[in-house]
Image (cartoon, rainbow, N blue to C red):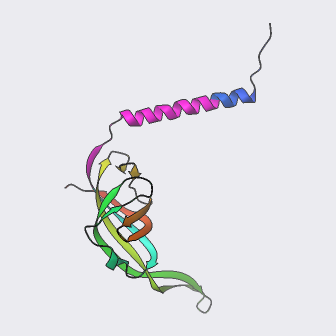
Amino acid sequence: MKKTKFTAIDLLIVIFLVLVIAFGFLKMKSIISDGGQTQKVRFCVLATNVDEGMQDIISVGDEVSISLKEKAYATVTNVTETQHFEDSFSANLGRYVSQSVIGKSDVLVELECMANVSDNEILNGNVPIRVGEESYIHGKGYSLHGYIVIAEETED
């Protein structure tokens, strides 16, 4: 009787099959599981080192897209613009100093949208809303790139 050997290729096939089954299980679990409830979410996107005057272009009440690829929208509730500062090493002082950059500013855009809120995530369509997540804001005549710095669900 001929004895078969278990080879490295066989091991790779088994690992691949286990990964495919685990991926399918997780996908089915997310489809079947409770998607959470839809409620109003407020979040802030901070865009740094943008041209001065962005606050004049962005209007409160604008409906903006918050993703490059997905259809996810939010409404602007407030815009705050502050002077942009950069740290540089001063050889004379022997330490880092903060200096303002002429013509540049930091823009904090406060947004509000309806999103699916569950115990472990907040989703606007397929776009996750979580602190530290990269976000794009596209409105009529402007586009910003920044990061979400505040995210909270509201009681409204």
* Residue 28 colored in magenta in the image: yes
The quadrant of the image that shows the C terminus is bottom left
Q: Residue at x 42, y 69 (%)?
A: 144
The furthest residue to the right: 2
Is residue 118 rendered to the left or right of residue 93? left
Specify the segment rendered in magenta: 15-40
Image coordinates for residue 94, horizontal then vertical, percent: 60, 87
Q: Quadrant of residue 141?
A: bottom left
The furthest residue to the left: 156
Image coordinates for residue 68, horizontal then vertical, percent: 44, 58
Is residue 100 rendered to the left or right of residue 35? right
Asked whether 32 or 125 is in front, the reply is 125
The quadrant of the image that shows the N terminus is top right
Image coordinates for residue 43, horizontal then vertical, percent: 33, 61
* Residue 5 colored in magenta in the image: no
Q: Residue at x 78, y 13 (%)?
A: 3
The furthest residue to the front: 141
